[in-house]
Amino acid sequence: MGSKNKLKRFKENETFSNVIQPTREELTGAQFQYKGKWNTKFFKNDQPIVLELGCGKGEYSVGLAQAFPEKNFIGIDIKGARFWRGAKTAVEEEMDNVGFLRTQIELIDYAFAENEVSEIWITFPDPQIKYKRTKHRLTNTEFLQKYKKILKQDGVVNLKTDSEFMHGYTLGLLHGEGHEVLYANHHVYKNEGAPKEVTGIQTFYEKQYLEKGKPITYIKFRIK
């Protein structure tokens, strides 16, 4: 994407009422205006809040919001030019149960209050295979503790990935730390039983992975 195009998208994002772009200081400094108030201030309803971390183009957030109108969805990514597509689709289709937050995922506990979130989706994250990069792996111990802080007591996390490494690493970690694995499938399109929201929504990249014959994996778990 050219820088001109990026700039255009950034500008357009600023006009979308469904996009929130706080500075790092706004988030980490004084009380962030939406923290603990996403239901009352942003969605203006009391429906459960579901996050998609590293939402990319926002296809999954939009797809889930269409499939579950009784829930609220927030796609989170640091790359605003990417989720511009999802935000624009939601505006055009007048969807009021989906929004986008531009921030780093490590700041998530500044953006949401304790027990504010019902569910988290992590879709096709970078597996950060190199040992030096483990601190950026979205299912490492540190991130799980951040998620636990903002999730309701019975809240769940969904991991959907084409990385068998990420699938295996996460399963091993969950079992090792005594978390509750509710469901695991190492090939959702081959093995039956995956929830419909796992196979019914496909991102641009997922379609490419499938064309290459890559297995798509899925884990649903609860952090203890």
Image (cartoon, helix red, strand yellow):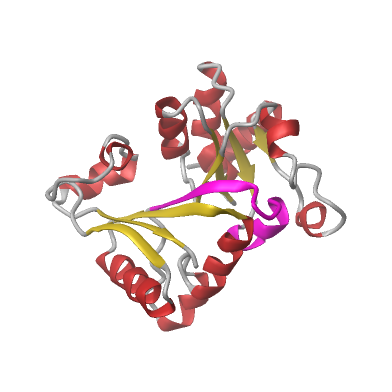
Magenta residues? 105-123
Residue positioned most to the bottom: 131
The residue at 57%/21% (across/down) is 91
Residue 109 painted magenta: yes
Left or right: residue 67 compared with residue 108: left
Q: Nearer the viewer, residue 191 or 53?
A: 191
Residue found 45% across the figure and 55% down from its top: 157
Report x, y in % for residue 36. Answer: 74, 46
Question: Quick check: can you spot residue 17?
Answer: no
In the displayed structure image, the side of residue 25 where residue 194 appears, left or right: left
Q: How many marks?
A: 0
39 left or right of 161 in image: right
x then y, percent, for residue 160: 34, 53
Q: Can you say whether 184 is above or below 171 in the image? A: above
Could you say which quadrant of the image residue 197 lies in? top left
Q: Magenta includes 165?
A: no
Single out the residue that lies furthest toward the front: 153
- Please name the residue shown 85% across and 58% down the image: 29
Viewer-proximal residue, 13 or 200? 200
Q: Which residue sits furthest right? A: 30
Q: Position of residue 117 (x, y in %)?
A: 59, 47
Q: Is residue 134 visible?
A: yes
Q: Is residue 4 left or right of residue 34?
A: left
Q: Is residue 78 above or below residue 180?
A: above
